[in-house]
Amino acid sequence: SDAPDLQARVSEIRKRTTLPLAAGFGISNPEHVRAVLADADGAIVGSALVKVLARAFGEGRDPVEVAMEFIRPLADIPRKPR
C-alpha cells in the first residue's frame, strides 16, 4: 500500500486484461485496504491474517472468531465501481 506506483501498475495491467485485480504486500489495516481499493478491485491481507491467527492460538482464543474480528472491518470497506 506504500508503493507509489501502484496506480500506474494497476493501470498498465488493466490494459491487458478485464479480470479483477487484487494487490497485496504489507497490507494489514483498513487504511491500507482503502488505499489499495482506490486502484485495485481487491486487497490481499494474507500475512497479516496469519499473524493475527498466530497470536490467537498463543492466547488460547478461538481462531475463527479472531479472524472474523480482523476481516470484518476490512470486508466492509466499499469498493469503487469499475
Image: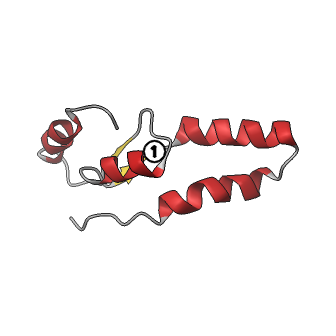
Q: Residue at x 74, y 36 (%)?
A: 54
Query: For the residue labelled by badge 1, is the local secondary structure a helix, a strand or a loop?
Result: loop
Is 52 rendered above or below residue 26? below
Give, as a three-letter code, the residue at label 1. Answer: Ile
Task: State the residue position of label 1.
Answer: 44
Tell me where residue 44 appears, x and y as whole percent: 45, 44
Quadrant housing the C terminus? bottom left
Q: Is residue 64 left or right of residue 68?
A: right
Q: Residue at x 65, y 58 (%)?
A: 69
Is 69 rendered above or below residue 45? below
Of the pair 63 and 16, the residue shown nearer to us: 63
Q: Is residue 36 left or right of residue 52?
A: left
Tell me where residue 13 appears, x and y as whole percent: 18, 41
Q: Residue at x 53, y 61 (%)?
A: 73
Of the pair 53 and 10, the residue shown nearer to us: 53
Tell me where residue 22 appears, x and y as whole percent: 35, 47
Is 56 rendered above or below residue 75? above
